[in-house]
Amino acid sequence: MYDLTGFQRDLLYVIAGKEEPHGLAIKEELEEYYEKEIHHGRLYPNLDTLVDKGLVEKGQRDRRTNFYSLTRRGRREIEARRDWEEQYVDL
């Protein structure tokens, strides 16, 4: 997880919090969070990077719609990140 950008980590968290979201659903969640438009040219290459790193799987719902889900490794990485954060942030 240390080699991901903040945007890529946010993508992982959104995917973890939804059940097999498609790209547009992920985009809408991030636009709400960032309070600005997320361009396709930023979203999809970063999703592909997460797929290439083995953190996310990409499936096909129909010919035009892909969905995304965390891999086992992706879940482990999020858990490890949260454990690390808890060392420093006590709410």
Image: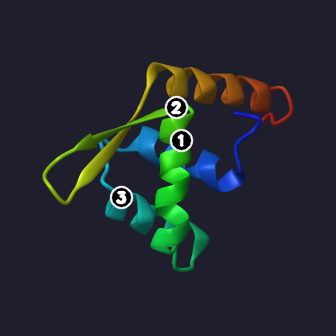
Q: Which residue is mark 3?
A: 23
**Residue 16 or 3: which is nearer the viewer?**
3
x and y, in percent, of residue 59 in the image: 27, 40
Name the N-terminal-most of marks 2 and 1. 1
Question: Mark 2 and 1 residues: CB-CB less than 8 Å, in contact?
Answer: yes
Name the N-terminal-most of marks 3 and 1. 3
x and y, in percent, of residue 56 in the image: 45, 35
**Residue 89 or 72: which is nearer the viewer?**
72
Q: Amino acid at mark 3?
A: Gly
**Residue 13 or 91: which is nearer the viewer?**
13
Q: Amino acid at mark 2?
A: Leu
Relative to 63, does residue 38 appear above or below in the rendering?
below
- Relative to 90, 46 lies left or right: left
Quadrant into which the C terminus falls: top right
Q: Amino acid at mark 1?
A: Leu
Q: Quadrant of residue 1?
A: top right
Q: Secondary structure at mark 3?
A: helix
- Relative to 78, 47 lies left or right: left
> Which numbered disc covers residue 55?
2
Q: Which residue is mark 1?
A: 50
Q: Secondary structure at mark 2?
A: loop
x and y, in percent, of residue 31 in the image: 50, 71
Q: Say which residue appears at 51% left-offset and 29% top-offset.
A: 54
Name the N-terminal-most of marks 3 and 2. 3
- Relative to 4, 31 lies left or right: left
